[in-house]
Amino acid sequence: MRKNGFWILLFIFLSDLFCQFPLGEIGRSRCAECGSISAPPLFLDVSVNDLKKSEKYLRNDLGLPSVNPNPSEPLWERSLKSHPILVFFSAVMFLGGGVAFFLIISRQNRRLREGMELVRENAGRFGGGGYGRPSGASAPFKEVIKATEEDVRAGGELPPEKAVRRMDSVLDSLRLALGTGGRTSRLTLFRYDESDDQFRICGVSSGEDFTLLGTSVSPPELVFSSPLRTLTFVPKTGNFGTVDSWIYPFGGDGGEFCVLMVEMTVSRPPDNWQDNVRESLHLLKSLIVRQESGGTDPTLTTRDSTGSLDYRATMNRLMEELAKTKKMEIPFSMIAFRVDNQDEVEKRYGTASLEAAWTRLTNAVSATLRPTDWVMRPRPDLLLIQVLEAGEAEGQAVLNRIVKSLSKFSSSKTLEKGLHYKVVLVPYPLDLAPSVGTFFEQILHKVDGPSSVDGTFYYS
């Protein structure tokens, strides 16, 4: 009985083993013979759709794309299904790059054709080389000149505002002409200073911006304060074909001497530049005639918050009066106010209160002056009064009158600090006839030294 039981158990074990791991046809036949003891059929009723759904859920859990790309499809179709927005922007950028490349090539070809035409037109000039100037390059100048001449004929004389705008248009056109054709250039304006025999820069242009450098030594307005005449331009070197800098000297009727230097990195300037500069001179002359006849200077429009002339306008006014004094020997005097505690007042009461104090001080001083006198504020702590047709005695009388008027504001019940000032009188020395820069330096030196007249001004 025990032997039979052993063989029965061995038979069951082998049958079960062959059912779980079938080996070819033998295993399958054995599983069929086992009947009820074979393994349950788990995947007999599973469809293809069920498998696809299970794959979808599994890919979502793993963070994979929901659509399984088909390797048989083209790459662009699979990319369009996976990332449609990225494919759209890539196509747009590709097309835009192609269009831009086409436009650049067309533009360069057009410039090359124009350059070849210029070379053919100027062949045989200046040793067979050199670049010319396109025929339409001087059109901006001609339009400005024509419009100005029409205004002069219509009104008899050019209004100051239009004269300034026309002059700005001429300068802008000149600067644009310097930069056309792919050339880089620079304009530099120099003024000759007689005191030390030096040329000093009073204006510079790099690109399209032209900056006037206002300094006490060489104010830029001196170039446009008198009628100019164009002299023969002087090349920097003797070889005309390789020169890269050109100097246009200007001589003023008052003895001033200025030069405009044109620098270019490519080729030589067009031949008609001199003509353009000469054509623009009558604009300056018409502006100066208008200023002298009307007694107004349209450039004196820069004022500070108190209504006084700022540094640039102050130097302009001094130059104009200095020219008249040298020509007609009419004296004038300057009264200088220097406030030495401005920072303390601003720290104590604020910037608004400080400006209010300066406004009250300016109004109090202006109330004692004539309509022909000028009030200026070239520096934040300096107030200048230009007394016209007044020597030292007349200037001292005006100074005493101003000090007496300011004595009414020498005390205050509400303020602890006021503007502490000292006053000096500086007549213009006719015998020495210093330049504008030298005279201005004398005023600063004297106002910084000891003074016999001082006081405190309370604006409230």
Image: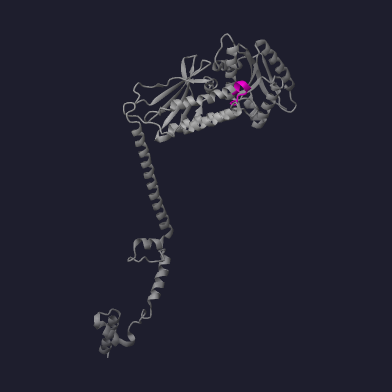
The answer to whether residue 156 is seen in the rendering is yes
Above or below — where is 303 with respect to 104? above
Q: Furthest residue to the top?
A: 431
Please name whichever residue, 30 or 47, is drawn nearer the observer in this view of the structure. Answer: 47
- What's drawn in magenta, residue-wise? 290-299
Above or below — where is 450 with respect to 274? above
Q: Furthest residue to the bottom?
A: 1
Please name whichever residue, 310 or 360, is drawn nearer the observer in this view of the structure. Answer: 310
- Quarter-of-image position of residue 44: bottom left
Residue 418 place in picture, x, y as percent:
69, 24
Q: Quadrant of the C terminus?
A: top right
Q: Quadrant of the N terminus?
A: bottom left
Residue 327 place in picture, x, y as percent:
58, 13
* Side of 169 where 178 appears, left or right: left
Q: Furthest residue to the front?
A: 153
Say which residue appears at 43% left-offset and 66% top-offset.
60
- Disc count in the image? 0
Residue 221 place in picture, x, y as percent:
54, 23
Q: Let me know if residue 455 is in the magenta part.
A: no
Please name whichever residue, 137 or 407, is drawn nearer the observer in this view of the structure. Answer: 137
Above or below — where is 158 with respect to 100? above
Please name whichever residue, 271 or 417, is drawn nearer the observer in this view of the structure. Answer: 271
Display colour scheme: one colour
* Side of 208 where 70 appears, left or right: left
The answer to whether residue 214 is seen in the rendering is no
Residue 6 place in picture, x, y as percent:
27, 86
Say which residue appears at 51% left-offset and 15% top-offset.
255
Above or below — where is 36 with respect to 266? below
- Quarter-of-image position of residue 304: top right
